[in-house]
Image (cartoon, coloured by chain):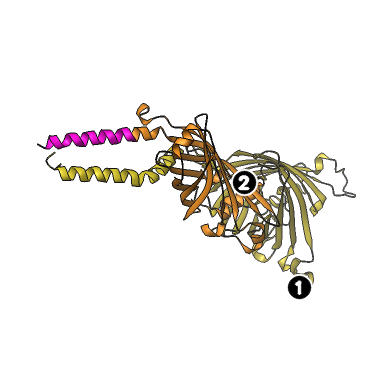
């Protein structure tokens, strides 16, 4: 109280008034920010990967409700096939696919690969989305169930290629985390079941774990890596783990993915258990995926 | 001796306090304001809408503040929404757009007594994509059934807020994007009744 001389009192009062009016605007916003921060909602983390595929394998992403994606995937021949084959560009395998987001979480897709004239279909469900805010989920989890049917005509093999014998199934749990806006990592335990295998030494069930990563270089350009490790009792001699590296380029309505890989097939029953190329001996297939998005149902 | 000066100070405080409490009666707030924007170009029309704008308006002091989560904007196309957040507004780095400022030319008695629409101008700082710019925005205010209705339409140039648009899509995105604000704010109860 000793310090409160009349002059100081007035000064203090003046200061308080001044501060009150001068800071009111900011306080208004601060108050607003505090309130909106209080009600921090859980926000899903978007765009862990650019596309629904990392390279060969699926990513945790789905098209989103009401969106149809037309996916064209292409693999040329191996780089080491020589100048006569124009380093692989003379040969090509292709997969045409359509996938549709029934809801933001559920998607279905169909495709046709030129390799062994194979039709495939899948259902993909985003079980968990990585999020921010209170009670946030640290990772995204997407479940995939896929089946493929080869329509190849077989002649004189001594047995009938009945419908069940032409089918394969893939079950996959894709677990991904976007660590930073630029870096995303995915781990995907995978089981591929084949009703019929080529030789007796092939397992019907092949267990593998996929590892994939995406690092953005610029806003619209990213580096991708993908590796499928087959578990010890699924490692048939002569076959190799699928390895791929690529870049994602994003333009307005397209995502272009250019890559090199040692596998020719673009669906799981091909590249997980049946990759034969040795990446480091030049059995490298150059390829690309082009995804075009169509909005069938407006979200507004 | 000092206590005799302390009394006027106390009275001053009380007066100021009373004034302040009264000011609370003229505060209006919403958390569900609608903000939409529209970009029109010969190649493509792009539209987005958010219904999560928060706003506080104090009619006594004519001050107002807006805050809007960038992530809350919804587009017709999911890919556009993704690009908007990832590449243009960079919502992970700049999660909110804000406006703080004051209303010019607001006629408080008339606003209170009639439910007539009043044309006003808001002047203040608009922050988008981490860039703050001084703007003047024409709009209207109206008191109806105890609620304050606010509307405004103005243009924002992405370039002013360092929002980069690559050459490839330059013709798809308007140089000037029309923004519409439409909100219904409820009066805030006096601070006295809520500690």
Residue B28 x/y as whole percent: 46, 35
Tell me the residue at 31%/32% (across/down). Answer: B18
Residue A289, percent across and down? 71, 56
Q: Nearer the viewer, residue A296 or A112?
A: A296
Neighbor class of circle 2 (other Cα within 10 Å; few <14, some 14-19, many 20+) is: many
- Relative to B180, B97 lies left or right: left
The furthest residue to the right: A156
Please tell me in which quadrant of the rendered image residue A86 appears.
Answer: bottom right
Q: Is residue B35 visible?
A: yes
The chain coloured yellow carries which letter?
A
Tell me: A294 left or right of A162.
left
Same chain check for tags 1 and 2: no
| Residue that lies at the very extreme toward the bottom in this rendered image | A83
State the residue in front, B74 or A12: A12
Q: On the image, which quarter does residue A94 sit in?
A: bottom right
Point out the stretch of residues depicted in magenta. B1-19
* Chain letter matching colour orange: B
Q: Position of residue B119 (x, y in %)?
A: 53, 43
Secondary structure found at label 1:
helix
Identify residue for label 1: A83
Task: Give the letter of the chain under mark 2.
Answer: B
């Amino acid at each position: 109280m000793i310090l409160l001389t009349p002059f100081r009192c007035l000064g203090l009062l003046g200061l308080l008034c001044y501060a009150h009016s001068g800071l009111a605007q900011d306080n208004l916003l601060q108050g607003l920010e505090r309130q909106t921060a209080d009600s921090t909602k859980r926000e899903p983390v978007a765009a862990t990967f650019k596309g629904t595929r990392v390279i060969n394998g699926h990513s945790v992403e789905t098209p989103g409700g009401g969106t149809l994606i037309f996916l064209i995937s292409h693999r040329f021949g191996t780089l080491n096939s020589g100048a006569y084959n124009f380093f692989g560009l003379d040969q090509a395998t292709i997969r045409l696919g359509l996938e549709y987001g029934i809801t933001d979480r559920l998607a279905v897709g169909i495709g046709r690969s030129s390799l062994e004239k194979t039709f495939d279909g899948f259902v993909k469900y985003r079980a968990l989305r990585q999020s921010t805010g209170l009670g946030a989920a640290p990772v995204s989890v997407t479940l995939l169930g896929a089946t493929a049917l080869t329509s190849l005509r077989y002649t004189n093999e001594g047995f009938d290629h009945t419908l069940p014998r032409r089918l394969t199934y893939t079950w996959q749990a894709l677990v991904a985390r976007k660590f930073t806006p630029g870096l995303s990592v995915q781990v995907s335990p995978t089981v591929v079941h084949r009703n019929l295998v080529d030789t007796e030494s092939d397992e019907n069930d092949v267990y593998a774990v996929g590892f994939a990563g995406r690092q953005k270089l610029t806003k619209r350009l990213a580096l991708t890596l993908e590796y499928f490790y087959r578990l010890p009792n699924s490692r048939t001699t002569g076959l190799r783990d699928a390895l791929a590296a690529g870049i994602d380029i994003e333009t307005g309505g397209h995502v272009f993915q250019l890559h090199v890989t040692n596998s020719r097939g673009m669906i799981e029953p091909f590249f997980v258990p049946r990759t034969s190329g040795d990446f480091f001996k030049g059995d490298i297939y150059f390829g690309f995926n082009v995804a075009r998005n169509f909005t069938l149902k407006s979200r507004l | 001796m000092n206590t005799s000066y302390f009394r006027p100070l106390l009275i001053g405080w009380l007066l100021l306090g009373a004034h302040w409490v009264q000011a609370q009666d003229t505060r209006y707030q919403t958390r569900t304001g609608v903000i939409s924007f529209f970009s029109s170009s010969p190649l493509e029309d792009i539209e987005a809408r958010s219904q999560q704008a928060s706003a506080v308006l104090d009619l006594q002091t004519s001050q107002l503040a807006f805050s809007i989560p960038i992530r809350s904007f919804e587009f017709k196309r999911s890919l556009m929404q993704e690009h908007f957040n990832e590449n243009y507004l960079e919502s992970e780095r700049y999660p909110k757009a804000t406006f703080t400022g004051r209303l010019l030319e607001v006629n408080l008695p008339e606003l209170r007594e009639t439910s007539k629409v009043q044309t006003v101008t808001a002047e203040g700082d608009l922050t988008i994509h981490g860039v703050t710019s001084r703007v003047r925005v024409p709009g209207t205010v109206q008191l109806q059934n105890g609620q304050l209705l606010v509307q405004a339409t103005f243009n924002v140039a992405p370039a002013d807020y360092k929002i980069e648009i690559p050459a490839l899509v330059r013709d798809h995105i308007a140089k000037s994007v029309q923004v519409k604000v439409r909100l219904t704010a409820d009066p805030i109860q006096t601070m006295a009744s809520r500690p």
